[in-house]
């Protein structure tokens, strides 16, 4: 078990390293130059050249890569070319916002999704079909569009909730409850957007997993020995269905993060996704590199955590029976 | 896929609904000049004809079933022409990812030695890359265009197909009819082409149905971020993006392409589910 985890951790690290390397060279392939954008159309070629030299962009690619890697490992993530601010500080503001949004929506999606899926697995065909239609539709909603529709209804028509950013203009003046309420009001629409889509995906999967488990002989055995149906459902079916569900939870992190990129763009939520989109557009190399590294690390860490949780849930894996 | 499989798909309510909706969408896209007002970029009289609500007729007597946008362009016409881009890009991207996926998967199963191991490792690596990050980077690399979106989506979507084909080829290779073919002296690569691959493609069709929905959604997402198909060429994604600015006075501009997108993606999912059950009735979800 431990050996397997160690192997997974090493693979994960290699993956992050691969993503980082790929990103670095892809970025350099891209046309457009951060310096030309920074200095504007009036800059003379000499000025551009001098600035490129100052940023170290005139050196050979491999040398730039090695230098960047060294500085990055030592915690010197450089400064944003567009804003001049330290990348570390820029992302230290963005990461909590994304983790807050993605984490909360993961919790909401799976709690509601497991509930809906479990209801479907035991419901009468008509209710099951109705819920299936709902979850398929939810899962098919593009986040950026659902976000716009929610803004249209709740911001423009009903005038209940703010549509943009993570805090109101007067947020700095608010204290205690007022501040919390302001934050929650700003969180409401992006969180609802991500969670509705997440619920669709989770419920579909839970329904399938529970149906699979219910067809297993041990469930028939449990029923045959006279256990009450709710107990069979809770202790035997749901528990065993949780194993693929937790694995999916880890695997769905990349998808959720991807969704967050679009949703952050719609709601101008100050998270990593939005920073990444802006930085890619401006060819802000240091910010793109750091944001990519962080998102790849989050994804890999999520998968590892899911593996750990599965091992904790499933004694067969915990005790090393069966090679996964 | 045999005729019997397709029969089961059509008799399945989800399969019938899904393929019906997709058929209508494809026909609309193909017949866009016939079923709509013609030029999707036509702006006749911008100030007089803009922001007309659905089901109104403008000063020239032209009827706008879904209203007009801020340049007075007919939303229905743009939607019908946008279907060409959205469905075309989605379909071609999935086709590309299937070609790459089948090639990699079959090659990895055929050459089991170091070549296979390298191909599988490459697949796992690519599978774990954050797709949207990659899409953003690749989308920003060259001038955005429909072709670029097809290539980018295709090259980031082949991994699950490769895994599927690899597993399928490996299990088929151990089946008696393959052994029989080899024993009869049929050359191995002919066995692969004629006997194994056609059988291995069945589950690929399911993943293709689901993949098209996903690709259409991602294409629209890229266009929404301005990294995909560029206006004035209409795509459902850039239509949603342009409707974003007029959400207050013309909500239909963003609503219509979004609904079209959701309906098509749901149809792909339903068709995929029905195909899955038709191929493997033991895993049928009643």
Image (cartoon, rainbow, N blue to C red):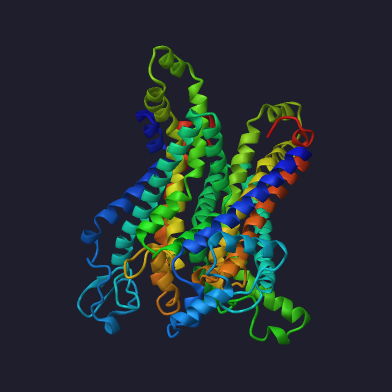
Which x, y percent locates residue B5? 40, 31
Q: Residue at x 26, y 76 (%)?
A: B43
Q: Is residue B112 above or below residue B264?
A: above
Which x, y percent locates residue B241? 43, 70
Residue in the foreground of this view, choosing between A171 and B96: B96
Residue in the foreground of this view, choosing between A62 and A76: A62
| Quadrant assignment for the N terminus of chain A | top right
Q: Is residue B209 above or below residue B88?
A: above
Which x, y percent locates residue A224? 72, 26
Which x, y percent locates residue A143? 52, 62
Q: Residue at x 75, y 45 (%)?
A: A308
The reply to whether residue A194 is in sight is: no
| Quadrant assignment for the C terminus of chain A | top right
Q: Is residue A158 left or right of residue A175?
A: left
Q: Is residue A177 left or right of residue B119?
A: right
**Quarter of the rendering containing residue A80:** bottom right
């Amino acid at each position: 078990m431990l050996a397997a985890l160690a192997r997974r951790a090493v693979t994960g690290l290699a993956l992050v390293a691969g993503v980082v390397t790929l990103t670095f060279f892809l970025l350099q392939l891209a046309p457009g130059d951060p310096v030309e954008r920074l200095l504007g159309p009036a800059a003379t070629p000499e000025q551009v050249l001098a600035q490129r030299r100052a940023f170290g962009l005139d050196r050979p690619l491999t040398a730039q890569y090695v230098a960047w890697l060294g500085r990055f490992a030592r915690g010197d993530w450089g400064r944003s070319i567009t804003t001049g601010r330290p990348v570390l500080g820029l992302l230290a503001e963005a990461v909590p916002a994304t983790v807050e949004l993605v984490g909360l929506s993961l919790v909401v999606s799976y709690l509601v999704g497991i509930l809906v899926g479990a209801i479907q697995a035991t419901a009468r065909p008509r209710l099951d079909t109705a819920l299936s239609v709902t979850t398929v539709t939810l899962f098919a909603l593009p986040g950026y569009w659902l976000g716009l529709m929610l803004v249209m209804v709740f911001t423009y028509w009903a005038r209940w909730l703010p549509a943009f950013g993570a805090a109101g203009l007067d947020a700095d003046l608010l204290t205690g409850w007022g501040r919390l309420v302001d934050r929650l009001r700003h969180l409401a629409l992006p969180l609802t957007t991500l969670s509705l889509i997440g619920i669709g995906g989770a419920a579909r999967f839970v329904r399938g997993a529970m149906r699979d488990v219910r067809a297993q002989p041990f469930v028939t055995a449990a029923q045959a020995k006279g256990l009450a149906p709710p107990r069979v459902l809770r202790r035997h079916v749901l528990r065993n269905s949780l194993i693929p569900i937790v694995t999916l939870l880890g695997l769905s992190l990349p998808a959720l993060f991807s969704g967050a990129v679009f949703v952050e763009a719609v709601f101008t939520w100050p998270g990593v996704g939005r920073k990444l989109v802006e930085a890619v557009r401006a060819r802000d190399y240091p910010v793109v590199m750091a944001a990519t590294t962080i998102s790849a690390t989050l994804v890999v860490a999520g998968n590892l955590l899911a593996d750990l949780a599965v091992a904790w849930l499933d004694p067969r894996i915990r005790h090393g029976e069966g090679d996964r | 896929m045999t005729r019997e499989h397709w029969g089961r798909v059509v008799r399945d309510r989800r399969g019938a609904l899904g393929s019906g909706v997709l058929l209508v969408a494809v026909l609309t896209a193909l017949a866009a000049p016939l079923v709509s007002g013609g030029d999707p970029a036509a702006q006749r009289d911008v100030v007089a004809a803009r922001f007309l609500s659905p089901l109104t007729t403008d000063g020239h007597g032209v009827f706008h079933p879904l209203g007009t946008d801020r340049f007075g362009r007919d939303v229905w016409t743009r939607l019908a022409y946008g279907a060409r881009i959205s469905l075309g890009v989605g379909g071609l991207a999935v086709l590309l990812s299937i070609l790459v996926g089948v090639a990699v998967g079959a090659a990895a199963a055929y050459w089991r030695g170091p070549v296979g191991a390298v191909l599988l490792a490459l697949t796992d690596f690519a599978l774990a890359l954050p797709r949207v990050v990659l899409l953003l980077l690749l989308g920003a690399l060259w001038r955005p265009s429909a072709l670029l979106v097809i290539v980018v989506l295709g090259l980031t979507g082949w991994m699950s197909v490769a895994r599927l084909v690899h597993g399928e080829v490996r299990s088929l290779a151990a089946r008696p009819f393959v052994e029989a073919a080899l024993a009869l002296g049929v050359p191995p690569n002919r066995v692969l082409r004629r006997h194994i691959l056609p059988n291995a493609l069945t589950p690929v069709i399911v993943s293709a149905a689901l993949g098209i929905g996903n690709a259409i959604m991602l294409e629209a997402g890229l266009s929404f971020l301005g990294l995909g198909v560029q206006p004035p060429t209409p795509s459902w994604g850039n239509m949603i993006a342009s409707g974003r600015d007029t959400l207050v006075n013309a909500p239909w501009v963003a609503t219509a392409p979004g609904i079209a997108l959701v309906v098509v993606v749901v149809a792909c999912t339903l068709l995929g589910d029905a195909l899955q059950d038709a191929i493997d009735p033991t895993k049928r979800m009643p």
